[in-house]
Structure formats: C-alpha cells, structure tokens
Amino acid sequence: MVDQKVLEAQQWVNATYGAVPGYTRCAEDGRTGWPTMHSLTRALQHELGITTLSDSFGPTTLAKLTERGPVGPGFADPNIVRIVQHALFCKGYWAGETTSGTYGATTQNAVVRMKADCGVTAAGVLQPKWFKALLTMDAYILVSGGSTEVRAIQQWLNHRYLDRSTFFVVPCDGRFSRDVQVALMKAIQYESGIPDDQATGSFGPATRDALRRNTVGPGSPGTWVQLFSAACVFNGDVNGAATVFKAAWDDRLAEYVRVFQEFSALDRTGVGDYRTWAQLLVSTGDPDRPASACDTRFHISTARAQALRAAGYTVVGRYLDEDPTSTLNKELQPGELDAIFAGGMRVFPISQYDGRELTKFSYQQGYQHGLRAHERAVHYGFNRGTVIYFAVDFDATDEQITSNVLPYFHGVQAALANQGKRYVAAVYGSRNVCARVTNQAYARYSFVSGMSYGFSGNLGFPMPANWSFNQIKEFKFTSGTDTFDLDRDVHRPFSDPGVGPENVGGTTSPVDAFLHYVEQLYATAVAYGPGDANLRVLEYLRYPTYVDVYSGWQNLIGDVDRAWIDYAKANGPGRVESYRDPSLGVTVNVDHLGATANAVYLKGNVNGVTANRGDFGGWGGDLATFYGEWRANSESYPSGYAFCADRLAKVDVRSSFPLGDLIEDVDGHLLGLSLRIGGRVDELLRLHLAGTGHVGRFARFFGARYDARNADIVAAARNMLISDGTDAELGGLCTAAIRTTGGWNCLLPGMLPADKLDPFLQGYADTIEKLARG
C-alpha cells in the first residue's frame, strides 16, 4: 500500500539532495523503511556541514546537532525542519504542511504525541536525542505480537533514564529486543553508581559485582524490584508462570522466580540472587555455575570419560562426522562410544559440516547433511528416536535465518523423512536461531550457544523453551598430564537425556511401550466378551479425562461402557499416558489421541467443507479454543493470521493448540478413519508409529479430510466455528470451548467481520498445508 505522505518525503529528499556527494537515493514507493530513514539521515548530515555522509546517526551527527540546539519554533534552517516533518510522517505522525519549512503548532503536537508514546511528557521541541530516535524504524506504539507489559517497561526506561548522557530513546513497541536489553543493562549500571560514561550496557566486572551486592527479594528498594521484574518480564512466560512489572516484591514475583530458576536449572532460592540475575540478563548466565554436560572435538577415551565423570559431567557432546576437507579429526572414533559408556557417561550426537558461514546453508545442503547424519548414526548403531543436533555455528541474523538457515533445516527434515524418520532433528545455535528453527522447522530440542554472548541472536532473546543444553564456557580440562579443550554445558533435567548403552545396537523405539500397551489392552477387550474391541480400546484410552473431566464429551459422542472400564482396570495393563512421537520427538498424550480417534470412529465420515462432531473431537475443538485465545490477545495480535503464524502448532510456544495437540488430532483422525474401514486398532497403530505412516501423516490428513484443497480447510474451519443451526448442541459445545480461553466477553466468530475472521481461518489453513507439503 502506498502512503502518499511517505511518497512525498521520498520524492522531496531525493530531489533536494540527489546531487550531493555521498547521498544515497531511496526508492520512491510510498513505503516506510530503513532506506528512507537513511536518506533523511544523510540529508541532515549535509545540512549540518558534515561532508562524509553515512547511514548512521552517530556521535558526530549528534554533536553537530547539539551545537545547533533543539529544533523547534523559529528554527533557522527550513530544510532541517522539513526533514523533521517528513520523518514524522514516515513514523505515522501528522506533521502539517512541509512547503514553508516552518515549525508550527501541528509539528509541535506531532512531536508531543511521539514523546508521549515513548512515555515522556514534554514540550514539542525536538532535542538531539529525539531527532536520533525520529530517524529510526523503531516503533513507539504497540505492534502485532507486542506485549503491553513490555511496552510499559520501555516507557518507564525512557521516562526515568533519558536524561542520562549515554541513554537514548528505546522503542515502545512491546517487543523485547537487543536495544531494549542494552537499555535495561544501562539502567542497572546507573542505579549501581557506575558513571554514565562507563555505562556501556555490557555485562562487565563492575556490573557483575553490583548484582552480587543487590540480591532482590522481600523488602528490596522499589527501583531494584522494578529492574528485576523488568528482566523477568523480558524473559517471558516460563512453564505457565508469568509476572508483571512492579515496584514491590510479592508472592507472584517470588513464584515466577522459582519457576524460572527450575526452568534454568538453577537452585530454587525464590529470590533474585546473582546467578538468577545473570541468567535473566546474559546468554551465558554465570559461566562458573555447576554444569553436568560438556562437548568437545577431542576423542574421549575411557580414562577421559572417567575423569570427566569424576568432575561432575554426566553427558558429552561428540560429532557424528566432519567435513571431508577437515584436518581436526573430531568425529567419533571406533570404540569411542564404548569408552564413553565404560567411563559412566552418556553422549549426545552433533552433526556439523563447517557451518560457520551463511553459504554453507541451503535446502540442498541441509538435505545432503541430513542423509549423511542418518548414515553415520546408523553406522554407530544409534537406536530409533535418537536426537541429533545440527549446528549453526555463526551469528545468523533474522534475515539470514529466513533466507538460508530455515531452508537448510527443512532440507534436514526432508532427508530424515526420506529415510523413514528414524532420528529426531534438533538444533545448535544462538537463542534466536534455536527458537526460530524450533518453531518453523520443528526442531525438537535446542542446544544453545550461550557462551557466544555477543551474538546478536543471543542478546534480546529469551531462552528457548525446549532448551536441553546451554553452552556457557570454553576452557582447558586437565586430568593429570592430559589436557584438552572442553565446553561446559548446563544440562536441563527432563529434556534430552542423551544416549546411553541401552540406546545403541538395538531395535528399541520411543513408541514401543505404548504399542505393547495397546496390544495388551486389545487382548483385554477381546477377553471381556462379544462386542467391538476397537471401540472399547478407544473408550479406555480417552477415559477418564475425555469422559468425566471434560463432561461435554458425553454430550458430544456419548458415555463409555462403565462395566468395560471397571473390567479393564482390574484385568488390563497398567496405563501408559504418553509417548514420544517418532518423527518430531514431541510428547503425545494418549487420552487426547484416543478421544479424537473415538470421535472420528463414531461421528466422522466427513470431508471437504462441512464439519461435524467427529471434527470437533479433534481439530475442531482445538481450533475453537485457539480462536478464543486469539480474541483474548487481540490487543497485541489484531491480525488473526499473525497469531496463527506465531502460535499455532509450535514446539516452543505455549498456546492452546501446540504441535503435540495437532499430532494427536491428525493421528487420531487417521486412526478413526482407518478403523471405520476395518482392521485392528493395535495393528493400525503399529503400522503408523513403528512403520513409516507417521512420516506422511500431515499430507494424508490434508488429503483425507480436506481433499488436499486449502479453500476446503478455510470453509470447514468456518463451518466448525460458526454454527448453521443444524446441530444446536454442537454449536453450544463450540461456543463453550471458545469461552474457555477467550473469556466470557469474547467476540464469537459469527459476530466478527469477515475481514477480521478470514485471516485467522487462512492462517490455520496455511499452517496445515505447509505441514502437508513438508
């Protein structure tokens, strides 16, 4: 969309300064962007008498502008006034007429509004720091996906610290970023008594000493609680716990701290001690904290494994292979796995072929590396379900992750799928790399390169929720006369345990226990007597959660056979409640899988654009709760499509419709359809989970349920959310599901204008099709 005022700004700056040496023309397309701001910056520099122009509004520009004084009414240089006005228009503020170069009331009001958006109440003159802020692409209003709580902190930082000489205006868009993280660090330094000119925003010795002196807890000064709670908010919700920006310590903040400490593998002290501060502020955390894992390029003998084990390390990362041109000899050696196990350690395999520059990453390279990693893992005898960490060993920017890194991991996943998905892909890299690869290419676990604290992908990003290892320090490990390079890694309990001797040289799989359980349950159902043994198995799988806990299920598809339930409890196998998916490694909940299959088996038999009770038992019910969640978060996510893109079917994002739920919906749907045709539930599940059925699950679901048409997904989703009155009870169940996550004031789908609802439905459809296409 062309913005006429932006177009005028582009035309004016190009026409006025196009012949100036060092000026760079911007496109005249009516769209705000960095090129336009850079052109305006160079124009300002020229007006200030600077001869060497650049895109950066640096110290020289600031000093020259300071010499001129604030820009306001009566300012002598009309072109500088015009630069201000055109920049305001590019920022979305109405600055008045620009032909006269007069700084009038309208321009003053625009500046007042911009300052107010930044949390500062001040007159409408433009001081040098504000001019610098004006010539950026920083947003000062809440953007899609932003948090009102984060924005409140950004405004507070501006209000409290803008008068400090080394502090500059930070964005107020509600998004945690590198600049905001640096601003918070500077604030901590100011409050610690560090002089302004030494407050660099880096986590140096003086800052560390100050934090050791300032444990935050009950009775702490309000400003320190504000700084600490701000750091907590920036690190996001953790395992369902959240806090808010506040000036007084309370139970909610204490509980968040305990959960964050557990999430970060720290001692649960419940207060803001030094190690907690460090973990909140920098990717290494405290590099000298206890660590139970390590990784190295050096061969691990039995003696080395024993020495590492004696030093407290229980698992070591080693390389499956290396680039053919490498002379490091870093890959696993013959007999090394046995030596590691004999020394009492486990191992986590790493796949890296150089990986230190952008050109090494593409879909085709990822595909080839996935094939090679698979071949080497088979060579070493790793069992099905082994997690392999594919490395991104450079500071990939957000744009580079999009252009190269994500395609690389899509290639890895395609290669592993080509080989039957025997192994699970994980990622090594910066926090941003790990989070984006997890959420967009479905890496199961993250191995975070935390010791690279200067990486742009580590500063301003919270720890990915699926982290398993965090690399915090490189050092020389010495045992007797033996010395070798070692990286210390914090290992998160209850994540990827690594590989032990029981995971090598056998045929075990993460789904074995579940499949054996279903076989025993089917035999129990047959022994119970005549009737539908498949139906009995599904009823027992969904009981009690999708019968009594969620009582609406009795209205949806009916009650279970209570006599059979009692019989199975007394005579059947012990329950298996979950298993790890063989393709993507996420946890699959057996009761939800069974409930979905039960609903489709009894009420399914539908495809295309219609929607019924069988659908609501799976994807339809989850979509309803997810819709309610979107409406509850509509202030920060006005776009339903963006909400789906950010939160639907993700590994690393807490939502009402994560990837695990979608897998349960898809597998349950396919199982229910197959049972309607014929066959035994235990045999069908074995074919699906122990064979290769799970590899193409999303494509099969896309075809079976939606005739492989994106438009049919949209239509079916609409018909699921908006009742046509033919099944009033189903419509009521759907409304109730929406209310559970959207609140009782949630705007129902039928009340939402099409231009608002349609993008949400399209976001769901595109997610399903993307997964189906691989």
Image (cartoon, helix red, strand yellow):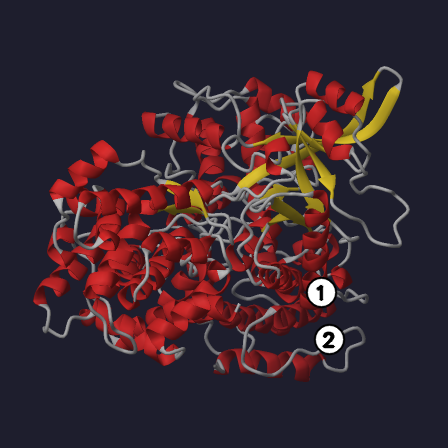
Rendered view: 598 above or below 85: above
Q: Secondary structure at mark 2?
A: loop
The amino acid sitting under disc 2 is: Thr
Residue 99 shows in this picture: no
The amino acid sitting under disc 1 is: Asp
The CA distance from mark 1 to mark 2 is 9 Å
The percent coordinates of residue 237 (x first, y second) are 41, 41
Residue 115 shows in this picture: yes
Binning the other alpha carbons within 10 Å of mark 2 as few (below 14), some (14 to 19) or many (20 upward) gives many
Q: What label sits on residue 55 in the rendered view? A: 1
Q: What label sits on residue 551 in the rendered view? A: none
The residue depicted at 14 percent of the width and 75 percent of the height is 724
Q: Who is closer to the viewer here, 582 or 644? A: 582
Binning the other alpha carbons within 10 Å of mark 1 as few (below 14), some (14 to 19) or many (20 upward) gives some
**CB atoms of marks 1 and 2 within 8 Å:** yes
Q: Who is closer to the viewer here, 299 or 753? A: 299
The percent coordinates of residue 182 (x first, y second) are 60, 42
Earlier residue among tags 1 and 2: 2
Q: Which residue is mark 2?
A: 24
Q: Who is closer to the viewer here, 456 or 423? A: 423
Q: Who is closer to the viewer here, 29 or 675? A: 675
